[in-house]
Amino acid sequence: MGFTLRDHTADVAVEADGESLGGVFAAVADGLTAAMCDDPAETGDRFSFSVRAEGREALLFDYLDQLIYERDVRGVLPAAHEATVRREGDEWVVEASARGVPFADVDARDVKAVTYSEMRLAETDAGWEAYVVFDV
C-alpha cells in the first residue's frame, strides 16, 4: 500500500491506496511530500493537528490543504505522515501528524494547492484508494 505520482497536464496527481481510510489519507500526503521533494531529510520535529468536514472527500481535501498551510506557516516540508479517520456524528474527523523537515534541510519544489479536479476516494476489497490532483 502506498502512492504513485502521475503526470497531469501542468499539474501533478497522486494515486494512493491504504488498508484503512486513515492509511490512504497518509499515503496521499506522502505523495504530496514526494511531489515537493525527491528525498526529504530525516530531520525535524513531529507536529499534530485535526481537521473536521461534512464528508470524506471534503475531509481529504481539507486535510491536504491544512498540510500545505502548515508547510507555509511553519516553514517546513511535512513528511512521514500518520492519520486516523473517524466519523463523529454528522462529521468526519482526521487526527493527523507529520514530521516537519526544515526547508534549510531540503531542496523543495512548490505545490500551490490541492484541487477537487478528478478527486476520487473509494472503498475497495483491499481497503481504500484515492486520486488527487495538485496545482503546481
Image (tube, helix red, strand yellow):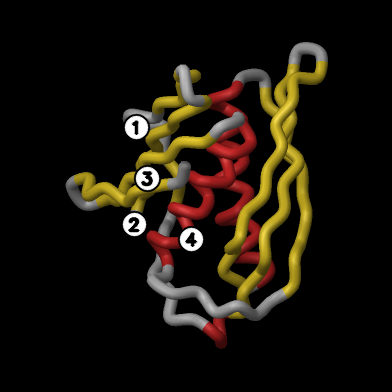
Say which mark, if any, is on residue 14: 3
Disc 1, SS: loop
Q: Residue furthest toward the top?
A: 90
Q: Specify few, some or many for label 4: CA neighbours under 10 Å numbering under 14, 14-19, or 20 or more.
A: many
Q: Is residue 59 above or below residue 48?
A: above
Q: Quadrant of residue 103?
A: bottom right
Say which mark, if any, is on residue 132: none
Q: Is residue 44 above or below residue 61?
A: below
Q: Earlier in the sequence, mark 3 or mark 1?
A: 3
Q: Specify few, some or many for label 1: CA neighbours under 10 Å numbering under 14, 14-19, or 20 or more.
A: few
Whether pointer 4 and pointer 3 mark residues with C-beta atoms closer than 8 Å, the reply is no
Residue at 68% x, 69% y is 74
Which residue position holds label 1?
117
Of circles 2 and 4, the one toward us is 4
Side (left or right) of 33 relative to 13: right
Q: Specify few, some or many for label 2: CA neighbours under 10 Å numbering under 14, 14-19, or 20 or more.
A: some
Residue at 61% x, 60% y is 80
Residue at 44% x, 74% y is 39
Q: Residue furthest toward the left?
A: 9
Q: Is residue 97 above or below residue 8?
A: below
Which residue position holds label 2?
136
